[in-house]
Image (cartoon, rainbow, N blue to C red):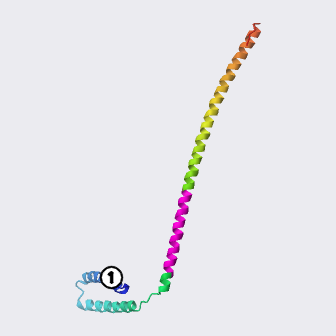
Amino acid sequence: MSFKASYTAEYLVGLAKVKTDEMNKIGQEGAGNLLRMMADKIEWLRNQLDQLAEFNPSWDMLEATQRSLSEHQKELSDTVMEVDLLNARRHAYRKNVLEQKRNYEACITDLREECGALKREIKRLNAVDELRMFFDAMQVKLGI
């Protein structure tokens, strides 16, 4: 079935549906109005058929449009690939940042523990110094 024939068939089926709706609307208006409307529609259909008969597509234009569409589809697929690549890079970067953050937090925890141990050692040394000063004041010599 040619393009013209398939388009005309689809058009006529659609027109038949419209005609049925129009006839339901007419109802009581009378046969004269119906005949006038049908004559107008027949004239309109003849004009449409004449236009379809004169339809002569530019095949060069169609081929150029198809090439252009293919190029745009390729650009679109390339762009989608680039977006996927950027998303993968972003994901890897986020993963790296999260790993560095965990390492940083672990280092902070270790430093806090070391700081606490140093504070305890300082307190112990201060206590030893206080004892030494106390015993020195009491004239007792410690062998530490």
Q: Which residue is mark 1?
A: 10
The location of residue 127, given as percent across then percent down, is 69, 17
Q: Which residues are magenta?
A: 64-87
- Amino acid type at circle 1 is Glu
Majority secondary structure in the magenta region: helix
Relative image position of residue 67 (x, y in whole percent): 51, 78
Q: Position of residue 118 (x, y in %)?
A: 67, 26
How many C-alpha atoms fall within 10 Å of the one at disc 1: few (<14), some, or many (≥20)?
A: few
- Quadrant containing the C terminus is top right
Depth order, front residue of 39/76: 76
| Whether residue 134 is situated above or below residue 76 in the rendered picture | above
The local secondary structure at tag 1 comes to helix
Q: Name which quarter of the figure residue 50 lies in.
A: bottom left
Q: Looking at the rendering, in which quadrant would you find the N terminus?
A: bottom left
Q: Nearer the viewer, residue 21 or 97?
A: 97
Horizontally, residue 57 falls left or right of residue 95, namely left
Residue 139 image position (x, y, % from top left):
77, 7
